[in-house]
Amino acid sequence: MKKIIIIISVILGIIAIAFGAYFAWQKSKDILEPPIAEQSPILDTASKIIEQQKLKIISDQPAFYYWLTIATSSQNEIFYINQIGQILKIKEDGEDEIISDRQIENLQSVESNKDGGKIIVKYSGPEGQQVAYGAGNFEIYDLTKKIWQPLQKISAATFSPDGTKIVYLENAVVNSTLSNLITKDLINAKLKPTKILSLNQVDFNLDWISANKIILTPKFSNFVESEAWQIDIKKKTILPFTNGDGLMINFAKDGSWGLKFSLDFQKKPKLELIDANGASKANLGFSALPNKCLVTLSNIYCAISNNYNTIKAPILPDDYFKKAVYFSDEIYQIGINENNFSAVFNEGMPIVDAFNFEILNNRLFFINKYDNKIYGLDT
């Protein structure tokens, strides 16, 4: 009789373990598999829960990029460019308003100026379209005038810190790596563009971090040791800024602080706080890609992963931008001066893979990679 009881107990134990393993596996699948946009049961459930929490979806459509405008009135506004290139304004009390219904193929990057009144859009254009070596298709869109202005034969462009100028790399010779670094006034159209210097470069981006300092930032990869360079506009000089494998940099809007992502000799990622001269001021002790963080004068906000959806550890930063990996993030606030660390969102539901952060009136905004919608989070 005792043997029968023992056998039955063992069988019941095995069944219980099997059920537990099955439900744990299902739970793991829910967390680790990125949902299909607009059809995920996770996000459908999250949408119902989200209204009762401090986190809320605020855009009607998936966004490629979004930005805040500094309005002349008391009302600030949020605009975004969707994944087919149309520009919309968020209306939290109604359907989002289409500002530009022009569709743009193969968007590559978008950037807004300081007050949000203008954006630079880069795209590759229709398949097979020919452009000069290293160049792309760049256009500036003015939200007030609702006018598109093309920029010819350039490979990179960005706004000045005050948003009144642009700097760009112009292809000096067709099918050559020789480029001219040029600034152009956006307010006074009569002023001629100013050449700063000429240089040989391939696949550099631009970051104008202060009145007289521009950073040349390389395209990032886990497999390459990259170097960033600083250009003094007044002196017309170029000097090393910082370097590292997989190098990525993200500066505060005033250029006073920045985040540097790189890989050590074991290819393990590290995140450092750097100053305007590229000098490391602190190792933050956690890993996050700079585009998943926001640096302000007093705080850093970061989406820190506690899980990912691949069996093997992802190759960063490459796999993230190839969409070969999705993270499950928690969002934290780090006080720069107080040196404190506090959770802003760590509730587990809805699952977020957050990037492109902005903050306004104690509300943190970001895009969730799982559905590409814009979210607002009360802090």
Image (spheres, rainbow, N blue to C red):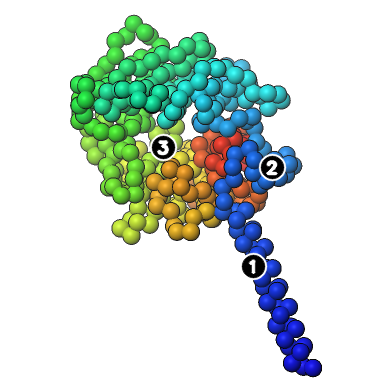
Residue at figure coordinates x 71%, y 73% from the top left: 16
Q: Is residue 102 visible?
A: yes
Give the percent coordinates (x, y) of residue 261: 38, 47
How many numbered marks have been drawn onto this rendered protein structure? 3
Instruction: Tell whether label 3 touches label 1 (CB within 8 Å).
Output: no
| Direction from residue 186 to residue 177 in the image, left or right | left
Mark nearer the viewer, 3 or 2: 2
Give the percent coordinates (x, y) of residue 38: 63, 37
The CA span between labels 1 and 3 is: 45 Å
The CA span between labels 3 and 2 is: 35 Å
Give the percent coordinates (x, y) of residue 249: 38, 41
| SS for dot 1 | helix
Along the viewing direction, whichever of 270 and 133 lies nearer the viewer: 133
| Direction from residue 378 to residue 113 in the image, left or right | left
Residue type pointed to by label 1: Ala
Mark nearer the viewer, 1 or 3: 1
Q: Earlier in the sequence, mark 1 or mark 2?
A: 1
Dot 3: few (<14), some (14–19), or many (≥20) neighbours within 10 Å?
Answer: many
Residue at figure coordinates x 32%, y 17% from the top left: 152
Residue at figure coordinates x 73%, y 88% from the top left: 6
**Residue corresponding to mark 3:** 251
Please tell me whether residue 153 is drawn above or below residue 330 in the rendered image.
above
Give the percent coordinates (x, y) of residue 169: 29, 24
**Residue corresponding to mark 2:** 44
| SS for dot 3 | strand
| Direction from residue 96 to residue 353 in the image, left or right | left
